[in-house]
Image (tube, helix red, strand yellow):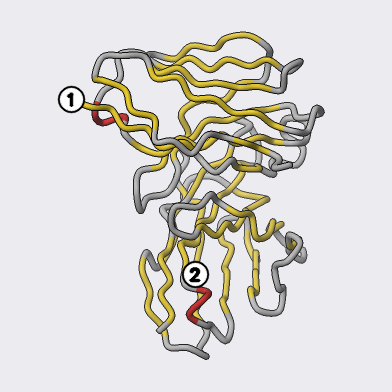
Amino acid sequence: GAVVSQHPSRVICKSGTSVKIECRSLDFQATTMFWYRQFPKKSLMLMATSNEGSKATYEQGVEKDKFLINHASLTLSTLTVTSAHPEDSSFYICSARARTGVDHIYFGEGSWLTVV
Amino acid sequence: QKEVEQNSGPLSVPEGAIASLNCTYSDRGSQSFFWYRQYSGKSPELIMFIYSNGDKEDGRFTAQLNKASQYVSLLIRDSQPSDSATYLCAVNPGYGGATNKLIFGTGTLLAVQP
């Protein structure tokens, strides 16, 4: 099956710094990738939709200047959490849609971010 | 009203029983529906998807869709302790293959007792 890889799986950063999370589709080209955030015991909340070669579309309430998304190629999207604060600590998950074929979405393994 | 609603549970069933998980959605125009399983601390994994009214079976899993009632369910037959996880219902509000934007419910925690 299709594989989506995220890196890093866990990261701890200091408050005020920035951290980048990568999402790669390993065996298919992903024209669209999605970034979710999940707080403990809560559901996945869509943050933004990332389209290759264009600006990301952010969901209401998500600060685009804080959560920078770049989708520079058909296999890579990155999420940068800028000026991180402890309340940004969460599980960040990306997913990718295959360019053709099956109409469902493949999830990455997720990245745990802890801001101290 | 939440777009996708699920009972948070926990739903406790004995090993070997049928687990029934339910989900309702608010957007009547929704076209495709997904069930994901998520173990604690892990990413969701797709179990099944369904587009048409009726039942769709895959092994021990059966998805049921009733668009008139805006209701989708997942039945797990012969439940095993390894099935214990949170089950997330997700709805694609657009036509299949169009937006691919998934709206998730809060999930139902299933506990299968040995």
Q: Residue at x 46, y 36 (%)?
A: B108
Q: Which mark is residue A21?
A: 2
Query: Where does residue B94 sit, x and y in percent of width and height?
Result: 78, 35
Looking at the image, can residue A1 be seen? no
Q: Is the residue A55 above or below the residue B52 in the image?
A: below
Quadrant of the image for the N terminus of chain A?
top left
Crowding at dot 2, Cα within 10 Å, few <14 / some 14-19 / many 20+, comes out as: many
Output the chain of dot 1. Answer: B
Output the chain of dot 2. Answer: A
Crowding at dot 1, Cα within 10 Å, few <14 / some 14-19 / many 20+, comes out as: few
* Quarter occupied by residue A97: top right
**As shown in the figure, which amino acid type bears the numbered disc 2?**
Ile
Q: Residue at x 57, y 87 (%)?
A: A83
Q: Which mark is residue B114?
A: 1
From the viewer's perspective, tell me whether residue A76 is left or right of residue B70: left
Q: Mark 2 near mark 1, Cβ–Cβ under 8 Å?
A: no
Furthest residue in direction right, as rendered: B29
Looking at the image, can residue A106 be seen? yes
